[in-house]
Amino acid sequence: MDKTSLRIQYRKARAELSAAEITTYSQQIVERLLNFDYSTIKYVHTFLPILRNNEPNMWDYIQGLEERYSQISLAISRSNPHDYSMDHFLYSGKLNLIENQWGIVQPEAGVRIKESSLDMVIVPLLVADKKGNRVGYGKGFYDRFLAKCRKDCVKVGVSFFEPVSAIADVDRYDIHLDKLVTPQTVYSFN
């Protein structure tokens, strides 16, 4: 299937999940993420969920990472709608978070961090395929962002759904995932 068809299908599938399913699946994803080996990781970037889009709830991941791995610094982003870029900020509970026009909660300001500092990025998506290609919302924010990260930065997608066989229209601008975490398992694409 192509990205447009997959985007329609999986937005619908995610919208049809119950609140209980979203909570359970999010907890399973978070627990799998927290069991990763973080021994060489200093900076992790994560997304803040768009709750109205039934995205995996990453707030528990943020809390768990702070509790279990206090040596790790967290980063979150602010989207720039004019050029589809993102600015990244160190996360702390003291940041003033605001909601943008897409329902994304993001920092108003803060201490900036460069993409080259990041060791791991948790990537939102609708669905991925068995080769680590992903389908997001179609604006290209994450492909632009991930293209600026170091080659050894671990790109980890999270999805409520198992991967499809293949995404038909992958292009040279698409950035592949290294791992995909679902409620059932962790896939590695290296």
Image (cartoon, helix red, strand yellow):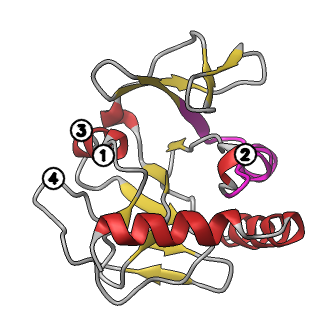
Looking at the image, do the residues carrying marks 3 and 1 touch, with CB atoms under 8 Å apart?
Answer: yes
Looking at the image, do the residues carrying marks 2 and 3 touch, with CB atoms under 8 Å apart?
Answer: no
Give the x, y percent position of residue 100.
Answer: 58, 22
Using the image, determine if residue 179 lies above or below residue 70: below
Q: Amino acid at mark 1?
A: Leu
Dot 2: element: helix
Dot 1: element: helix
Q: Marks 4 and 2: which is nearer the front? A: 2
Mark 4 highlights which residue? 173
Q: Marks 3 and 4: which is nearer the front? A: 4
| C-alpha span from label 3 to label 4 | 12 Å
| C-alpha span from label 1 to label 4 | 10 Å
- From the image, which quarter does the N terminus lie in? bottom left
Q: Is residue 182 visible?
A: yes
Disc marking residue 148 = 3
What residue do we see at 72% from left, 69% from top?
A: 16
Q: Amino acid at mark 2?
A: Leu
Q: Which residues are magenta?
A: 56-76
Q: Amino acid at mark 3?
A: Lys
Mark 1 highlights which residue? 146
Earlier along the polypeptide chain: callout 1 or callout 4? 1
